[in-house]
Image (spheres, rainbow, N blue to C red):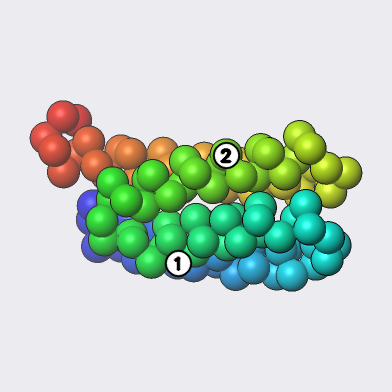
């Protein structure tokens, strides 16, 4: 990945992590949200933390999509906001996937 593009995806992943942490901190303090919240924070922040390891970051992005989808489809939490998170996660995942293919010489 080019250095400028690399810096952009790092910043984007960091910003995404901050938004997820703020979002999760506003979820109701009910047992149903505890596990999903914990997993969501772990996976969403793992994207940026592992950005140098594209395969791990991509797996974290895919797992984040799973937890966001589960939260969207099983609760009455703001579906529009969750869908925005899903869109951002998908875009970051596409960047990581394309970078991974480039690194492996398949592009």
How far across and how far down the image is residue 90, in percent?
Answer: 52, 40
Q: What element carries label 1?
A: helix
Is 2 placed left or right of 38 in the picture?
A: left
Q: State the residue in front, 55 or 94.
A: 55
Give residue 101's quadrant in the image.
Answer: top left
How far across and how far down the image is residue 99, in percent?
Answer: 27, 44
**Which residue reaches farthest front?**
31
Residue at image coords 61%, 61%? 38
How far across and how far down the image is residue 53, in percent?
Answer: 25, 56
Q: Which mark is residue 11?
A: 1
Q: Residue 46 carries which label?
A: none
Q: What element carries label 2?
A: helix
Is 44 placed left or right of 76 in the picture?
A: left
In this view, 59 is above or below 38: above
In this view, 40 is above or below 72: below
Q: Which of marks 2 and 1 is in front?
A: 2
The residue that label 2 is drawn on is 66
What's the CA distance linking mark 2 and mark 1?
22 Å
Residue at image coords 16%, 29%? 106
Say whether marks 2 and 1 touch (CB < 8 Å): no
Image quarter hosting the C terminus? top left
How far across and how far down the image is residue 70, in percent?
Answer: 68, 39
């Amino acid at each position: 990945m080019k250095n400028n593009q690399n810096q952009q995806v790092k910043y984007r992943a960091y910003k995404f992590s901050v938004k997820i942490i703020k979002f999760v901190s506003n979820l109701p303090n009910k047992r149903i949200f505890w596990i999903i919240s914990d997993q969501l924070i772990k996976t969403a922040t793992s994207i940026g933390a592992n950005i140098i390891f594209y395969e791990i970051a991509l797996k974290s992005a895919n797992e984040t999509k799973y937890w966001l989808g589960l939260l969207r489809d099983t609760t009455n939490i703001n579906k529009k906001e969750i869908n925005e998170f899903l869109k951002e996660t998908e875009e970051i995942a596409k960047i990581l996937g394309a970078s991974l293919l480039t690194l492996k010489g398949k592009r």
